[in-house]
Amino acid sequence: MAGFFAMGGYGAFVWTGWGLTLVFVLLLWLHTETRLAKLQSQLQSQLQSQLQSQAENGKTDAKNLPEA
Amino acid sequence: MFDYLANPTRFMRLADYTVWPLRLIAAAGLLIGSWLGLASSPADYQQGDAVRLMYVHVPSAWLALSSYLMLGLASLFFIVWRHPLADIAARAIAPAGAGFAFLTLVTGALWGAPIWGTWWVWDGRLTSMLVLFFFFIGYLALANGFDRPERGARPAAILAMVGVLNLPIVKFSVDWWNTLHQPASILRSGGMAIDSAMLWPLFTMFAGLQAFFLLMVVQRMRLLLGQARLARLADQQEAS
């Protein structure tokens, strides 16, 4: 096991390179998915509130509010 | 084809179908590729285990180059046909592309330090790759440097198109000049000069990172389209 991590004496270079690559992938992936999920919930609530206010103003039938 | 995809609603519908397959291919490719690259593949007879850096360095370089080509093409479509979705595609490509260009430089330095005995030399391949990274940074600065994003779209697209001229320089720099960097081993005339025991981990990592890159482009395009829609809804609500 220690030999695996030592990588024949190149461990510091190999693990730093692989670590940076995988951390970059993981952070960009999580960041993008989190922002997208947050935006979709913002969009949904914005649409709901807009349709609600339209319904209150009599522009749309409140019973037929479409899903966001 | 481009007209069909240029419609944001159609794009969003198509994107819904691509997200899960891309997530699965990316996760599987990266997991299997990491195991193959770090544990299963053999050490090189000259470089020892330092060769394992190839499995992250080479796919990063391929992705940096191919993503810049995609950025240039999207910018061309935006400038010539004024497709707004082309600008959004370019904006979605640039951050991941810049990240892969940066990773290429860093993993290359980490590989060069023990094998060449230096972190950096100003040779044709390394310098042209650094220039490619600066083109990505320049594009991002121009595209995001204005209060209204549409004002930065045109200068950023022109810069992206100019940067495409650097791609053949990166690719052929190892043939045109004497460089410390080795010549091409895979995309070269005369066939591949690499053993299949190292080729499979390389292609598996590339498949995983390519799927991840495409996933990021699709998701960021959805994000940018969603942000524009949210801004329109807020404007409508203010107006009413």
Image: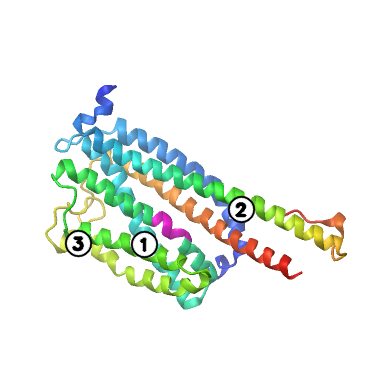
- Answer whether residue B71 is magenta in the image: no
Nearest-to-viewer mark from 1 and 3 = 1
Point out residue B132 in the picture as x, y percentages from the top left corner.
30, 62
- From the viewer's perspective, is residue A16 above or below residue B192? above
Instruction: Looking at the picture, tell me which residue is in the foreground, A50 or A8.
Output: A50
Query: In the image, what residue occupies the spot 78% across and 56% down?
Result: A66
Q: Residue furthest left?
A: B178
Q: Chain of mark 1?
A: B
Point out residue B172 in the picture as x, y percentages from the top left corner.
21, 62
Instruction: Looking at the picture, tell me which residue is in the foreground, A10 or B143.
Output: B143
> In screen coordinates, is B61 left or right of B12?
left
Task: Name the residue type under label 1.
Answer: Phe
Query: In the image, what residue occupies the spot 17% across and 38% down?
Result: B47
Any mark on residue A39, and which?
Answer: 2
SS type, badge 1: helix
Any mark on residue B173, and which?
Answer: 3
Q: Chain of mark 3?
A: B
Point out residue B195 in the picture as x, y percentages from the top left corner.
23, 41
> In screen coordinates, is B14 left or right of B56?
right
Point out residue A10 in the picture as x, y percentages from the top left corner.
21, 34
The quadrant in which residue B7 appears is: bottom right
